[in-house]
Image: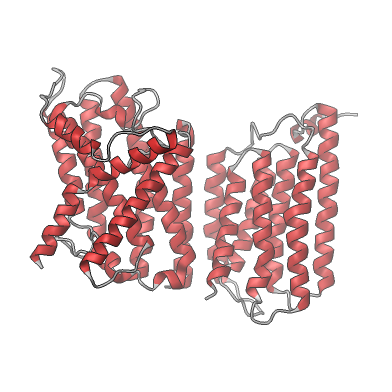
């Protein structure tokens, strides 16, 4: 059993930056370029680890603590989430709430750090991040409520380790709503393209990137790594909703899981290549539609008395 | 539980939301067309077990008339209009979406209280028809362009059609055909009104009508 726990933690720690590499490759393919190598995110992180950090004299300890706290929060969310049908190290009833609020904690400290720099750009980014976060959290919670109602479990491992196996047959349409809504939440939470462009550094339009402009060296490495893990966890959740089939063989599961998550990364890359970034004042409508999708699904589940 | 019927009804509600949430006239008409085609298939899905000839006829008529002829007519009506989007609606987009969301919740609550004389094959039919009707009203009240009001009227009529499907076995074919004819003529009349407004005022804002004096 312990070897499986170790495997779970290893995947959680090592796999995430590869997703960014796959997304980058897909975008490069669409642009007709060769693109950076798949392992480029790892190289970037390695490079950042060896650089010294520069701290502005106006910042306090919050600024220095934030990257560590946020990465730690995201990684602790990771040990609640079953990956590739592997039982997570920690599980208890109600951990879905802890899961969502660990992400909220990560966001909160980053916002604090951004405000701490005293830069007006970062303050603007912090304000946007807080607004959109407030919207996406509602949609996220409604989705999790639907999943909890369907599986009659309150823990992530209960929901995703077999809790949903018969739901696609019974209430497929509702789960499609959940998947669409969750995909929108994924794009918003990880500041991917229709909402935010992770590659540009145009301060006026950015949301998430603008908040970390002042971080450098190891701190930036923490933040980038934390974001990669966050994207990985959201993708894991999405593929666990879509593909409920799991074989008893642990290695077949692992292969299937990696295929699914690579497929999702390619899908995100395709969305990023084919869509333009939304105008900032349209983003709330997107979030609102994610919310409405989830609430319609929720109502249908309630009516059915599932 | 009929999964396909559920999928059709949920997508009808969501397409209704898309219509309410969009401001470009062409997009609204296209989404309306898709919604009507899905709606036209609902009778087939609902009575899939004992399919009768007139049900197929009604389905076909709904798909052809609502899904293709009326959208084409609406496109014909806006062919000369320069303003292709709803610039200044009475009710803003966010508020409209919020109202529609509330109306959907309300329809589900209302439908769960009602008792029907006929057996209902899916418990989503009545709420989705109510929410379509209310979304149609919201469009009629909240928009200023005549063509969006026509689309609101059509959306409302789609809701009524959905409700009527429940009574399809009891309701003679004639009544249904009569409704379709009414609808068609109403659309034609509104199309002519739109044309006339746009000829007189160079746009098709119905707000202009209140300042008419003879």
Q: What residue is at 20 percent from the left and 46 percent from the top? A: A74
Q: Please determine whether, in this image, residue B204 is positioned above or below residue B120.
A: above
Instruction: List x then y, in percent, for residue B180.
Output: 80, 61
Name the image colouring: secondary structure
Q: How many marks?
A: 0
Instruction: List x then y, in percent, for residue A97.
Output: 26, 56
Q: What residue is at 80 percent from the left and 27 percent from the top? A: B202
Q: Is residue A6 left or right of residue A299?
A: left
Residue A154 in sight here: no
Q: Is residue A290 left or right of residue A12?
A: right
Query: Residue most toward the right?
Result: B214
Q: Quadrant of residue A88?
A: bottom left
Instruction: List x then y, in percent, for residue A46.
Output: 14, 34
Q: Please determine whether, in this image, residue B122 is positioned above or below residue A28.
A: below
Q: Quadrant of residue A128?
A: top left
The one nearer the camera, A80 or A93, is: A80
Q: Quadrant of residue A217?
A: top left
The one nearer the camera, A149 or A275, is: A275
Query: Residue most toward the top?
Result: A57
Q: Is residue B50 left or right of residue A11?
A: right
Residue A40 in sight here: yes
Q: Quadrant of the C terminus of chain B?
A: top right
């Amino acid at each position: 059993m312990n070897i499986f726990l170790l495997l779970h933690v290893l995947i959680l720690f090592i796999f995430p930056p590869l997703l960014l590499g796959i997304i980058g490759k897909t975008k490069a393919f669409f642009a007709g370029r060769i693109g950076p190598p798949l392992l480029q995110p790892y190289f970037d992180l390695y490079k950042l680890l060896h650089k010294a950090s520069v701290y502005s004299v106006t910042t306090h300890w919050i600024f220095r603590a934030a990257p560590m706290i946020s990465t730690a929060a995201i990684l602790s969310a990771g040990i609640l989430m079953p990956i590739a049908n592997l039982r997570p190290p920690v599980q208890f009833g109600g951990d879905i709430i802890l899961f969502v609020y660990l992400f909220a904690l990560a966001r909160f400290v980053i916002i604090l750090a951004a405000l701490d720099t005293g830069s007006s750009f970062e303050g603007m980014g912090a304000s946007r991040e807080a607004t959109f976060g407030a919207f996406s959290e509602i949609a996220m919670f409604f989705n999790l409520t639907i999943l909890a109602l369907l599986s009659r479990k309150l823990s992530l491992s209960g929901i995703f380790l077999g809790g949903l196996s018969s739901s696609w047959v019974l209430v497929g349409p509702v789960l499609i709503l959940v998947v669409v809504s969750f995909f929108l939440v994924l794009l918003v939470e990880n500041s991917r393209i229709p909402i935010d462009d992770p590659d540009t550094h145009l301060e006026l339009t950015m949301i998430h990137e603008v908040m970390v402009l002042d971080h450098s060296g190891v701190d930036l490495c923490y933040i980038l790594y934390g974001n990669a893990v966050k994207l990985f966890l959201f993708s894991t959740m999405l593929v666990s909703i879509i593909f409920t089939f799991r074989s008893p063989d642990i290695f077949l599961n692992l292969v299937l899981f990696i295929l699914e998550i690579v497929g999702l990364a390619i899908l995100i890359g395709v969305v990023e290549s084919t869509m333009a970034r939304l105008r900032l004042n349209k983003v709330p409508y997107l979030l609102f539609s994610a919310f409405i999708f989830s609430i319609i699904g929720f109502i249908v589940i309630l009516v059915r008395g599932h | 539980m009929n999964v396909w019927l559920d999928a059709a009804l949920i997508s009808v509600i969501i397409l209704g939301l898309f219509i309410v949430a969009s401001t470009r006239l062409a997009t609204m008409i296209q989404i309306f067309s898709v919604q009507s085609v899905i709606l036209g298939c609902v009778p087939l899905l609902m009575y899939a077990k004992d399919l009768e000839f007139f049900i197929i006829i009604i389905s076909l008529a709904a798909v052809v008339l609502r899904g293709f002829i009326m959208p084409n007519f609406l496109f014909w009506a806006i062919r000369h209009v320069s303003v292709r989007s709803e610039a200044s609606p009475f009710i803003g987009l966010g508020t409209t979406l919020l109202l529609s969301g509330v109306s959907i919740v309300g329809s589900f609550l209302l439908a769960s209280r009602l008792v029907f004389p006929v057996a209902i094959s899916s418990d989503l039919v009545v709420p989705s028809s109510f929410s379509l009707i209310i979304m149609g009203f919201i469009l009629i009240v909240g928009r200023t362009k005549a063509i969006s009001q026509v689309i609101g009227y059509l959306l409302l009529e789609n809701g009524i059609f959905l409700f009527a499907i429940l009574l399809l076995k009891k309701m003679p074919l004639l009544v249904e055909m009569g409704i379709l004819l009414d609808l068609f003529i109403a659309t034609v009349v509104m199309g002519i009104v739109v044309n006339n407004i746009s000829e007189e005022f160079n746009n098709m804002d119905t707000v202009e009508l209140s300042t008419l004096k003879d």
